[in-house]
Structure formats: C-alpha cells, structure tokens
Image (spheres, rainbow, N blue to C red):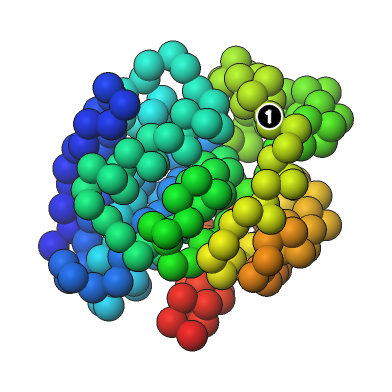
Amino acid sequence: MRQQSTVNVNGLTLTFQADGPIGAPVVLLVHGHGGSGADWDVVMDDLKADHRVYAPTLRGHEGSDWPGEYSFELYGSDIERFVETLGLSQVTLVGHSMGGIAAALLAQRRPTWLTRLVLEEAPIPTPGWMRREVIPRPDEATNDWNHTEAVVRDFINAADPQSWDRLADIAVPTLVIGGGADSGFPQHNVVGVAEQVPDGRAATIEVGHLVHDAAPEKFLKVLRDFIDG
C-alpha cells in the first residue's frame, strides 16, 4: 500500500510517497519545477514490484512548506537531508528537470550514497545558456515549469559557472534521458552531460520535456534496462 507521509529537513516539512517492499533496492524519484511526488505515480506503480520507491515533494510545491527561498543548492540540500533522515543507502536517484539538477548535486557531494543516477531532461545550469535561453523568454519558462517568474529567476541567479565541469566528479553510472526535438531544452546538452560524466550514457525518447509522463512505457523500459542491467 502506498504510504503518504512527511519528513522534517532543513527546518521544513516535506511530504513524500513511499511504496514497495522494505529492504528492496531503493529508488528515489525527484520531480521537476511545479510538480510534486505524485508526478511519479505511474512510474512508482511499476517499480514498486521489486524496489522500495520514494517520491518527495520539494520545498515550494504542493503539500510541502513554502519558505520563500529556492535554488539548486537548497533543493540539493533538501534531498541530501531526506536521504539521511530516512536512513536510505545504495540509492538509485532519478531526477526530472530541475529535480535532475538537485540529483546531480547530491551525486557530486555524496557519491557513496548512490548506486546509479538518472537525469531526465535536466538543464544542467551554465549561466550563459540560462541567460541566453531563459531570461529573454520568462513566460515560456514559467509555463513549462508551472511556477512563478520570481522562482525561475532565483534559479537563473543561482547558476554555478562550474556546474558543467563538476559533472566529472559524478562517480556512479549515470543515464541521461532527453525528450528530443519537442523538449524545449537544447538536446546536444543531453549527449554533452553524458560525455562529461565518467560512466555516462544517453538515451532519447522523442516526446518532449515530460518524458516519464508522456511515454511512461518507453521511459520505464529505458530506466529498467539501466537499473536492472
């Protein structure tokens, strides 16, 4: 039975879902901007058969606390504290969009906590790309992420100029999934991220930015081939 619960991290209350047998390999699913843990329901329904699956809702999103501060580093720190507080280990970490950036930060900081990393349509932040592509079109960015312009600008301003280079510090097998031509994010970055990570590989599913939602069967096939292989 799917568990709905809360956890206190960094002085905040976050909601989360959990399902699957306790003691099974752990998968942690991190949603993107404007989403929630419920975004992963279909993926959880599949993985719960043989994994213990967790899907938290990040700060500033439905059901969790709204502290008024948002950045890549804060989301990454919240996920780090989530893993630590629940005592999770040997985690397969899956992050979508902005959740993918938070996942990459955790993989850099706590490589021994993870067994695999999956980055789905994660716009790894280089300030040049963010300022060229997002600031001139804030309405498109906020529509895509269903969030406020102010929050999007918080992320832009927090972009770390060394983020791209630090991908080389990720020490676990990593799968980077792109959504193809309809994504809205530059797809050459998908291959680029995979090439920066020492044990990285890339896959493309031509359905746009919300890969796991638009094509769950294809997404799960690629995901399971990676985590179960």
Give the residue at the far bottom of this rendering. Answer: 229
205 up-or-down from 81: above or below = below
Q: Which residue is mark 1?
A: 159
User: Image point 74% across, 47% down: which residue?
Assistant: 165
Of 26 and 172, the residue lying toward us: 172
Give percent across and percent down for residue 174.
58, 66
User: Image point 68% across, 47% down: which residue?
Assistant: 166
Q: Is residue 163 shown left or right of residue 35?
A: right
Q: Helix, strand or loop at disc 1? A: loop
Residue 135, quarter of picture: top right
How packed is label 1: few (under 14 Cα within 10 Å), some, or many (20 or more)?
many
Count of labels shown?
1
Residue 14 in view in this figure: yes
Of 169 and 66, the residue lying toward us: 169
Q: Is residue 158 shown left or right of residue 126?
A: left
The amino acid sitting under disc 1 is: Ala
Of 125 and 37, the residue lying toward us: 125
Give percent across and percent down for residue 62.
35, 31
Residue 182 in view in this figure: no
User: Image point 69% across, 31% down: which residue?
Assistant: 160
Residue 147, quarter of picture: top right
Give percent across and percent down for residue 109.
50, 46
Question: Dividing the image into 4 quarters, which one contains the N terminus?
Answer: bottom left
Q: Is residue 204 shown left or right of residue 41?
A: right
18 up-or-down from 46: above or below = above
Give percent across and percent down for residue 50.
27, 77
User: Image point 35% across, 65% down: which residue?
Assistant: 90
